[in-house]
Amino acid sequence: MSPSSSPPGLGRFNALERHAADAALREACASAEWGRRLLAGRPYATTDDLLLASDAAMAELSTEDLQEAVSGHPPIGRPKPGDPASAREQRGMAGASDELRAEMLELNLAYQDRFGHVFLICATGLTGEQMRDAVKERIGNPPEREREIVRAELGKINRIRLTRLVDEGDEGDEGEEGEGGTSA
């Protein structure tokens, strides 16, 4: 289904009671401000409208709101226990060697020391090696530049999660690529 169409799941999302819609949005992004902005825009006519609202909300998040959003993501290689979405998002690390897992842990700790939060990347279709290379490349960024990269990565993750939210139940989830949103 194209993002410009209106899947039945979008109608269900638009019709949810505010607290239920807020909970659904918190599953997509931990930022309360991002969720408030999306709730204020309901009802959405199309998935594209919802995604554009997400992009606009993400662009306007303060540094504190951005930090809140990042706090909802576990490190890459350590998905949230019992959370199938987290496991799906981290699929690229599923077959990683012990050596690569150890290297990712070391890199994430160095990244956290430098930036104060986990390394975050939209990992859809990325291998463990590609994620490792990304953290190696980004660890040298100035904090301002890295903050904007994180904002862009969160935006990508939110788009994937929102699309899944409004498509949920309309088509099966089988065979989907993982999306990351998680860190090394």
Image (spheres, rainbow, N blue to C red):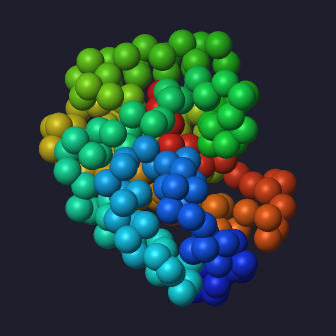
Q: Report whether 162 appears left or right of 6.
A: left
Q: Report whether 23 appears left or right of 88.
A: left
User: Nearest the camera: 22 or 79?
Assistant: 22
The structure residue drawn at horizontal position 59% and vertical position 23%, both measured from the top left corner, is 78
User: Nearest the camera: 75 or 28?
Assistant: 28
Whether 159 is drawn above or below 157: the answer is below
Residue 156's x, y, as percent?
A: 46, 58
Whether 41 is drawn above or below 63: the answer is below
The structure residue drawn at horizontal position 17% and vertical position 37%, both measured from the top left corner, is 143
Residue 5's x, y, as percent?
A: 64, 86
User: Nearest the camera: 79 or 142?
Assistant: 79
Residue 61's x, y, as percent?
A: 25, 55
Quadrant position of residue 168: bottom right
Whether 13 is drawn above or below 183: the answer is below
User: Nearest the camera: 150 or 101?
Assistant: 150
Residue 46's x, y, as percent?
A: 56, 84
The structure residue drawn at horizontal position 49% and vertical position 21%, both measured from the top left corner, is 104
The answer to whether residue 102 is visible is yes
How many discs mark residues in the rendered view? 0
Quarter of the image where the N terminus is located: bottom right
The structure residue drawn at horizontal position 22% and vertical position 41%, both measured from the top left corner, is 64
Whether 101 is drawn above or below 75: the answer is above
The answer to whether residue 28 is visible is no
Q: Report whether 23 appears left or right of 67.
A: right
